[in-house]
Image (cartoon, rainbow, N blue to C red):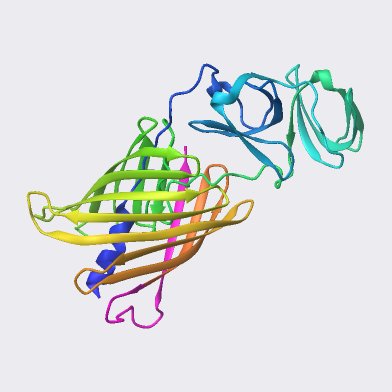
């Protein structure tokens, strides 16, 4: 039974990283998420929408409540703030005005020259479009939150990575904290130490990960992790791993593998395989499954199904984990182990 728990804990040590390609002549970093922009393309066509995200090679905008458009940066000739937007009646909006003031209300009507809002106090305000800097739709379906922890499943890695300067602090199973930080656009360091009360032996771990490939909806990462136990004369364990993820913010599939060995030519383990994925079911909820296969020796297998609740910076995971081996041995009694993870992203 101990070897089952050991191999169940091994994938929980693999941490994550980040990458991004060099930008174009336009300074895309100065664009503000949530604002309306007008993108002039090289073929002289124009796309107007609310900025959702900017990544290595593209810009994603929301053109209406159901349509997202991804624009290749190489096709963008210029960016400007539009003076006219299509504003839908009966929508709750926040209007940022050019004088710095902010107005919130329900859209009663709009035309090419003005927008009429019903404010929370019941009064009606007519605003000239020329006075409006940007319009932010407050309906959750129009601007869904992004999962801040797409670089990981429940604990194992995905192929996705952190951006430079981004990071997160996590605590899983209450006693296992960790910290990760994007040193550059393509390298992340991470690590932590367990804090099990009453135990003289604590597990500490460090990880380095890089993402050499990002094409469209596919990301491939590779890295290495060192783990050891305090107060014990042990060589520790080095695990090299790779993970690839295909998908988008709504759903994705992750496949990965790892191989562990002791430093100095010590014992080595067989290959460890990861199969996982996620499915978004609402604005702030997704289902996650993370499964580990260790066919070497007697074999050990970890299967899980859980959910992630998330906001802009915080996320919480809860899952049930099932452990077994080639002989069908599992935890006696209630067969599922509860998994709890809390994450703060900065």
Q: Is residue 36 left or right of residue 312?
A: right
Residue at the spot x=31%, y=49% of the render? 242
Q: Look at the image and tell me whether residue 197 can be seen.
A: no
Residue 234 occupies which quadrant of the picture? bottom left
Residue 93 occupies which quadrant of the picture? top right
Q: Position of residue 313 (x, y in %)?
A: 53, 42
Name above or below for residue 305 compared with residue 156. below
Residue nearer the viewer, 317 or 187: 187
Q: Is residue 208 left or right of residue 161?
A: left
Residue 340 magenta-highlighted: yes
Name above or below for residue 276 compared with residue 227. below
Residue nearer the viewer, 278 or 192: 278
Residue at the spot x=70%, y=20% of the render? 81
Quadrant location, the N terminus: bottom left
Q: Look at the image and tell me whether residue 114 can be seen.
A: yes
Residue 33 magenta-highlighted: no
The magenta segment is 323-346
Residue nearer the viewer, 197 or 217: 217
């Amino acid at each position: 039974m101990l070897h089952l728990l050991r191999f169940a804990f091994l994938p929980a040590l693999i941490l994550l990283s980040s990458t991004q390609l060099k930008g174009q002549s336009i300074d895309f970093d100065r664009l503000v998420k949530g604002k309306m922009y007008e993108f002039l393309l090289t073929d002289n066509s124009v796309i107007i929408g609310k900025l959702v995200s900017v990544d290595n090679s593209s810009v994603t905008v929301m053109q209406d409540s159901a349509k997202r458009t991804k624009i290749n940066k190489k096709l963008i000739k210029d960016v400007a703030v539009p003076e006219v937007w299509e504003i839908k009646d009966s929508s709750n909006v926040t209007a940022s005005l050019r004088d710095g003031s902010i107005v919130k209300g329900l859209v009663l009507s709009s035309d090419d020259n003005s927008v009429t809002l019903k404010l929370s106090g019941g009064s009606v305000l007519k605003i000239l479009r020329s006075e409006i800097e940007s319009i932010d739709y407050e309906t959750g379906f129009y601007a869904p939150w992004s999962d801040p922890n797409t670089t990981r499943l429940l604990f194992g890695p995905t192929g996705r990575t952190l951006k430079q300067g981004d990071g997160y602090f996590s605590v899983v199973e209450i006693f296992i904290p960790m910290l990760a930080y994007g040193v550059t656009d393509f390298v992340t360091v991470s690590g932590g130490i367990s804090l099990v009360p009453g135990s003289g032996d604590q597990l500490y771990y460090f990880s380095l990960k890089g993402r050499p490939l990002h094409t469209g909806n596919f990301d491939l990462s590779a890295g290495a992790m060192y783990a050891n136990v305090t107060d014990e004369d042990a060589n520790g364990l080095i695990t090299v791993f790779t993970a690839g993820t295909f998908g988008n913010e709504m759903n994705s599939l992750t496949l990965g593998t790892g191989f562990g060995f002791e430093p100095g030519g010590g014992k080595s383990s067989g290959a460890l395989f990861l199969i996982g994925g996620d499915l978004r079911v609402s604005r702030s909820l997704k289902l996650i499954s993370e499964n580990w296969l260790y066919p070497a020796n007697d074999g050990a297998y970890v299967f899980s199904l859980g959910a992630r609740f998330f906001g802009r910076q915080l996320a919480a995971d809860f899952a049930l984990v099932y452990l077994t081996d080639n002989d069908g041995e599992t935890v006696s009694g209630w067969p599922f182990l509860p998994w709890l993870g809390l994450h703060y992203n900065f």
